[in-house]
Image (cartoon, rainbow, N blue to C red):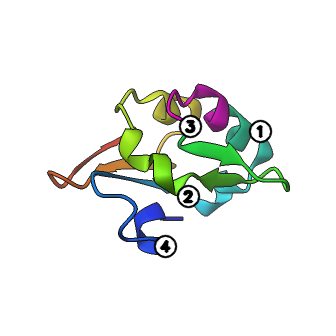
């Protein structure tokens, strides 16, 4: 799941990619929603993960989402310089 690919004008500075398997895991979805200080992640009614498009550029690069998810399942892309954060 790529946020910017769905709505290219929403994310100007930051994009977040989450593996589909992780997005469908209710436990990880709830954890991501809980740890993000700027509410980039939300849990849908079916308990799957949703990326809140309008909050993407609020990302403070704290890496809490990277720590809350299994290694290699989330990537925070810095669109302004072409680098990314991942673990």
* Crowd band around label 1 with a 10 angstrom C-alpha radius: few (<14), some (14–19), many (20+): some
Question: Which residue is depicted at the point 48% across and 73% down?
Answer: 6
N-term-proximal mark, 4 vs 3: 4
Mark in front: 3 vs 2:
3
Q: Quadrant location of the N terminus? A: bottom right
Q: Residues within 10 Å of mark 3 (few under 14, many from 20)?
A: some
Q: Residue at x 50, y 56 (%)?
A: 53
Q: Is residue 28 magenta?
A: no
- Return the disc, 1 or 2, that comes first in the chain's sequence: 2
Residue holding disc 2: 19
Of the numbered discs 4 and 2, the one sitting upstream in the chain is 4
Query: Magenta residues?
Result: 32-38
> Is residue 33 one of those drawn in magenta?
yes
- Rounded to the nearest angstrom, the CA distance separating label 4 from label 2 is 15 Å
Which numbered disc, 1 or 3, marks the residue that appears first in the sequence?
Answer: 1
Q: Which tag, 4 or 1, sits closer to the chain's start? A: 4
Q: Nearer the viewer, residue 44 or 28?
A: 44
Where 2 sits versus 85, above or below?
A: below
Q: CA distance from mark 3 to mark 2?
A: 18 Å
Upstream in sequence: badge 3 or badge 2:
2
State the CA–CA distance, disc 1 to disc 2.
14 Å
Name the one closer to the observer, 36 or 82. Answer: 36
Q: Position of residue 80 (x, y in %)?
A: 18, 52
Quadrant hosting residue 87: top left
Q: Which residue is mark 3?
A: 39
> Badge 1 is on which residue?
27
Spatial CA span between label 4 and label 3: 18 Å
Residue at mark 4: 6
Please provide percent x and percent y for residue 36: 54, 31
Instruction: Tell me where residue 44 appears, x and y as whole percent.
Output: 77, 53
Give the mark toward the camera: 4 or 2.
4
Is 76 situated above or below 30? below
């Amino acid at each position: 799941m790529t946020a910017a690919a769905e709505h290219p004008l929403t994310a100007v500075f930051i994009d977040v990619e989450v593996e589909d398997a992780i997005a469908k895991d209710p436990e990880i979805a709830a954890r991501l929603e809980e740890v993000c200080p700027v509410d980039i992640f939300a849990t849908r009614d079916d308990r799957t993960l949703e990326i809140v498009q309008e909050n993407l550029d609020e990302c403070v690069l704290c890496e809490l989402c990277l720590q809350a998810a299994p290694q290699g399942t989330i990537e925070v892309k810095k669109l302004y310089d072409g680098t990314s954060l991942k673990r």
